């Protein structure tokens, strides 16, 4: 980077930088020599001298009847920057008070199809916070991303030491899925609660770091990840509500199958 470009970086414009460097090289000089050295028009040199005088970077002197211009010591550039920094620090509180932040737009990333949804799962494996929160409709998850992929995901997540606190959607249970076996929960770093059977959610949700990922059912085949503090906090509250009303495996009567939909008492006893 040239000296001229360096001066642009610290706040001079291109013509001011040319004029200052020319004056610095020439020593006490006149308008004619400055014009020749800088390759700027005479009228422009007059304007640049005024600008640089205001910045304390050029001074005027006389030798007989001749007007001469002298570039200030380069240290003046540093003093000028220090004064600017001090001024900025002085007015910063007022600027902040005037600042109208307005709406902060969340960052949203969309994904399509099976492979797109799988990409969200892969992204959760990068979680810096080693605990992730899930809504897990197992049947929908298996249909959307495939059992083999889900199994490998569980195994890779476990290797990386990422814990799961998951609310399983009871109406979406698949009893013969191998990782629904309660003896695998702790081994695969999972804490699990089950919702009331009346709740039927087919979308999968994961909360990790500052992100919320939503993955649709196979029928709709899309997913998105949103980075929004407000949305994140809302989903955490939603997850906590379902977690607190959910029940562990030992309190679920999964051996009772084929409960009639129209038999309310029998359905309630399933939950109780």
Image (spheres, rainbow, N blue to C red):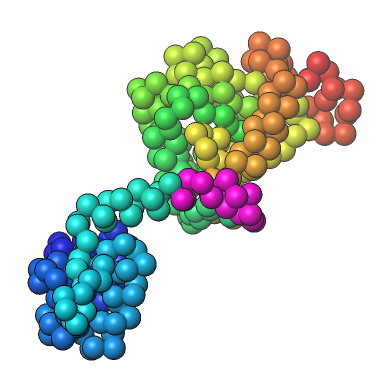
Near-viewer residue (196 or 46): 46
Number of disc labels: 0
Near-viewer residue (166 or 259): 166
Magenta includes 94?
Answer: yes
- Residue 2: x and y in percent read 14, 64
Would you place residue 60 above or below residue 108 in this image? Answer: below
Magenta includes 199?
Answer: no
| Residue under the image location 26 percent in, 67 percent down | 59
The N terminus lies in quadrant = bottom left
Would you place residue 235 above or below residue 186 in this image? Answer: below
| Residue under the image location 50 percent in, 34 percent down | 209
| Residue under the image location 23 percent in, 88 percent down | 41
- Residue located farthest toward the front when viewing the structure as drawn: 64
Along the horizontal axis of the image, is 114 left or right of 254? left
- Residue 265: x and y in percent read 89, 23
Would you place residue 134 above or below residue 247 in this image? Answer: below
The quadrant where residue 138 appears: top right
The C terminus lies in quadrant = top right
Along the horizontal axis of the image, is 127 left or right of 106? left
> Is residue 266 visible in this depiction of the protein?
yes
- Residue 133: x and y in percent read 57, 29
The quadrant where residue 54 appears: bottom left
Near-viewer residue (179 or 227): 227
> Is residue 101 visible in this depiction of the protein?
no
Along the horizontal axis of the image, is 81 left or right of 174? left
SS assignment for the magenta stretch, majority: helix
Q: State which region is magenta.
A: 87-104
Near-viewer residue (207 or 166): 207
- Residue 175: x and y in percent read 59, 25
């Amino acid at each position: 980077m040239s000296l001229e470009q360096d001066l642009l970086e610290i706040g001079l414009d291109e013509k001011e930088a040319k004029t200052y460097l020319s004056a610095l090289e020439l020593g006490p000089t006149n308008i004619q020599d400055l014009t020749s050295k800088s390759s700027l028009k005479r009228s422009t040199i007059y304007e640049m001298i005024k600008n640089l005088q205001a910045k304390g970077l050029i001074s005027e002197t006389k030798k007989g009847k001749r007007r001469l211009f002298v570039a200030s010591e380069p240290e003046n550039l540093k003093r000028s920057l220090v004064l600017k920094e001090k001024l900025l620090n002085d007015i910063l509180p007022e600027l902040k008070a005037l600042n109208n932040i307005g709406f902060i737009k969340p960052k949203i990333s969309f994904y399509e199809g099976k492979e797109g949804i799988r990409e969200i799962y892969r992204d959760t494996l990068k979680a810096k916070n080693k605990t992730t929160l899930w809504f897990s409709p197992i049947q929908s998850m298996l249909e959307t991303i495939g059992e083999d992929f889900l199994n490998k995901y569980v195994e890779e997540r476990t290797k990386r030491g990422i814990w799961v606190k998951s609310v399983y959607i009871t109406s979406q249970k698949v009893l013969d899925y191998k990782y629904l076996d309660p003896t695998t929960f702790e081994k695969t770093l999972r804490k699990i609660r089950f919702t009331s059977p009346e709740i039927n959610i087919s979308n999968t949700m994961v909360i990790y770091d500052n992100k919320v990922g939503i993955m649709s059912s196979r029928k709709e085949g899309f997913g998105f990840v949103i980075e929004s503090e407000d949305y994140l906090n809302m989903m955490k509250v939603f997850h906590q509500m379902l977690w607190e009303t959910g029940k562990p495996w030992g309190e679920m009567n999964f051996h009772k199958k084929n409960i009639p939909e129209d038999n309310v008492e029998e359905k309630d006893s399933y939950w109780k």
